[in-house]
Image (cartoon, helix red, strand yellow):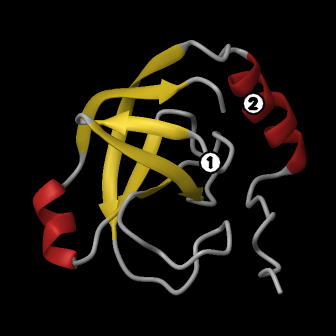
Amino acid sequence: MASPLANASVLHPDYVESVEIKAVQELAQDQTRIVQGNVSAYTGGYVMANGERPHVGAVANDVLPFGTVVKINGREYVVKDRFGGNYGIERFDIYMDDESSCWDFGRQYVDVEIVGGI
């Protein structure tokens, strides 16, 4: 049985319709979009917003649909979690295995490539 959170969106429905759908529609199958990312890191937790257990390779973003692939610092991540604070498309939170890795990563302002074909 799927988790009740599996298809949940933490965002207000009007926000999802006006921002998330627009962000997806702007990308064609063969396009990418670069945003100036405000990237942080987190650890812990028992379940992500998509219903899965947290794991390395997952990233939180309040706008992009679950399953969207993004490249940060040359590494691919998949959007599987939400902040829950209606942050914009430029905010990302990478899951890491331990707290010291999160502190080492800190907050970085880097280009984030949003891969098309979402």
Q: Quadrant of residue 56?
A: bottom left
Q: Quadrant of residue 4?
A: bottom right
Return the x and y of residue 105 as percentages of the image width and height.
16, 55
- Tell me the residue that label 1 is attached to: 67
44 in relation to 69, above or below:
below
13 in relation to 28, above or below:
below
62 in relation to 26, above or below:
below
30 in relation to 97, above or below:
above
Q: Nearer the viewer, residue 62 or 59?
A: 59
Q: Nearer the viewer, residue 97 or 1?
A: 1
Please tell me whether mark 2 or mark 1 is closer to you in this view.
Answer: 1
Q: CA distance from mark 2 to mark 1?
A: 17 Å
Q: What amino acid type is highlighted by mark number 1?
A: Gly
Label 2 crowd (10 A; few <14 / some 14-19 / many >=20)? some
Is 59 left, or right, of 61 in this rendering? left
Give the residue at x 31% y 59%.
41
Q: Earlier in the sequence, mark 2 or mark 1?
A: 2
Numbered mark located on residue 89 in the image: none
Query: In what element is the residue under mark 1?
Result: loop
Is 110 left, or right, of 49 in this rendering? left
Give the residue at x 55% y 48%.
61
Is 63 left, or right, of 18 in this rendering? left
Give the residue at x 77% y 81%.
3
Q: Nearer the viewer, residue 3 or 107?
A: 3
Label 1 crowd (10 A; few <14 / some 14-19 / many >=20)? some
- Tell me the residue that label 2 is attached to: 19
Query: In what element is the residue under mark 2?
Result: helix
Screen quadrant of the N terminus: bottom right
